[in-house]
Every structure is written in structure tokens, then in C-alpha cells.
Amino acid sequence: MLSYKITSPTDARNDFFKLLDLVVENHQVYIINRRDSENVALIAESDLVSLVETVYLLRRRAAVRQRCGRVSNARYLRRETLLQYWLLRRRLRTR
């Protein structure tokens, strides 16, 4: 599970480049706590891509299970999921 720390916009602004380095090097998520609006998360791109891929794969697998009605061919599901994962990673690398 990703850990996170909370900081204020002022502190984030004062040490912005140091904060960016901490986020990338330590895979640390920082929540920037805003007073009158929704908070903002500062997360490394590699961590975000990993989270998006995981969510995509879990949703895809659930959709396949639902379409099949029941899981009778687990090998097929694993193969299809791995293929989808490979295709998604390939698409993300070409951007």
C-alpha cells in the first residue's frame, strides 16, 4: 500500500523541488491540504501508471468473469489478462 504524507500549499511551494525529489525517490505520495477546496495528491508518474494498470486489469478480469457467467477456464482468463496487460504497457510506452 502506498503511504502518504500531508503538507500545506505553502510548505509545498517553499520546498517544491525537494518535494518532487522525495515523491520520486521514495515513492511517497504527498497530499496537499487545501482549505476551501478538494485536496490534491502529488504522486510519481511510475506509481500512477502502476495503479491505473492494476485497476484496468482488475476491471477487465471482472468483466470477463461476468460475461462468462462462471469461471470454468482459469487458464483462458489468465492468458487474456496477461495479453491485455502487455498491450496496455506497450501503448503507454509509445506515448
Image (tube, grey):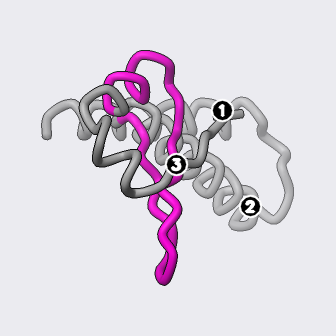
Report how far apart the C-alphas of labels 3 and 2 lie in the structure: 46 Å
Indicate which disc residue 7 carries: 3
Q: Residue 27, relative to residue 30: is it above or below?
A: above
Indicate which disc residue 41 carries: none
At label 1, which amino acid type do we have? Arg
* Disc on the earlier residue, 3 or 2: 3
Q: Does dot 1 land on a helix, a strand or a loop?
A: helix
Q: Horizontal and vertical percent for residue 95?
A: 13, 40
Q: Which of marks 1 and 2 is in front?
A: 1
Indicate which disc residue 68 carries: 2
Report how far apart the C-alphas of labels 3 and 1 lie in the structure: 41 Å
Residue position marked by numbered label 1 in the rendering: 78
Q: Does dot 2 land on a helix, a strand or a loop?
A: helix
Q: Image point 50% across, 25% down: which residue?
A: 27
Q: Image point 51% across, 43% down: which residue?
A: 30
18 relative to 5 in the view: left or right? left
50 relative to 20 in the view: left or right? right
At label 2, which amino acid type do we have? Cys
- Residue extending farthest to the bottom is 36
Q: Residue 78, relative to residue 57: is it above or below?
A: above
Q: Horizontal and vertical percent for residue 82?
A: 53, 30
Report how far apart the C-alphas of labels 1 and 2 lie in the structure: 14 Å
- The magenta region covers 20-44
